[in-house]
Image (spheres, rainbow, N blue to C red):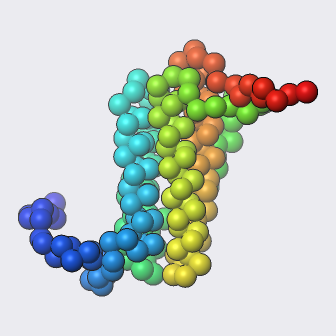
Amino acid sequence: MANRLSKIYTKTGDAGTTGLGDGTRVAKDSLRIAAIGDVDELNSVIGLMLTEPISTKIRDCLTRIQHDLFDMGGELCIPGYAMIKPERVTALENMLDEWNESLDPLKEFILPGGSCAAAYCHLARTVCRRAERKMTTLNSTEKITEVSLQYINRLSDLLFVLCRILNKEAGVHDVLWNNTNKA
């Protein structure tokens, strides 16, 4: 593989712009760059999850998701470009169904927490929801692929279920919301 980054700093962004993959320059605080940043942050939080002792099945799933998110960042970086395939949305749905089937139905809301891996997963879930909101807003002015919007939505659902699976595998109970305002 050729060197992709031979020089880390270019000084081209000193005036507050950055280059997209198609060569156009946009403001560093543009909605597109914010969406790319949220997807990148999500990928980093998933990287934190991977530092924890988790099952090989979850590790493999999360590693594949990291590659998908990198592809999504590439999609967002090149307006009009599509990398995420519908099969990846289906794969998330299949994992979601499989893992959710093994869990007891929820009767209460749960709070972020439990095991360290689950807490990281809750953080990933909330960053994923933010990325989804940013991508949805971006889509209202600059079209992005419908598949990417579906993927990021399913991913937040999968991460919620994975929070519960990670706690279950660690032998830790989910943290249940205690509604102190119950009558």
Which is more toward the observer, 15 or 10? 15
The residue sitting at 64% across, 43% down in the picture is 96
The residue sitting at 26% across, 75% down in the picture is 16
Q: Position of residue 2 (x, y in %)?
A: 13, 64
For the C terminus, which image quadrant? top right
As drawn, 48 above or below 94 = above
Can residue 104 be seen here? no
Q: Is residue 18 left or right of residue 79?
A: left
Which is more toward the observer, 5 or 173? 173
Question: Image quarter for residue 152?
Answer: bottom right
Q: How many marks do you count on the picture?
A: 0
Residue furthest toward the left?
A: 6
The residue sitting at 8% across, 64% down in the picture is 6
Q: Position of residue 90 (x, y in %)?
A: 61, 55
Which is more toward the observer, 151 or 156? 156
Residue furthest toward the right?
A: 183
Q: Position of residue 18 (x, y in %)?
A: 27, 75
Residue furthest toward the top?
A: 171
Which is more toward the observer, 2 or 43? 43
Residue furthest toward the bottom?
A: 24
For the N terminus, which image quadrant? bottom left
Can residue 49 be seen here? yes
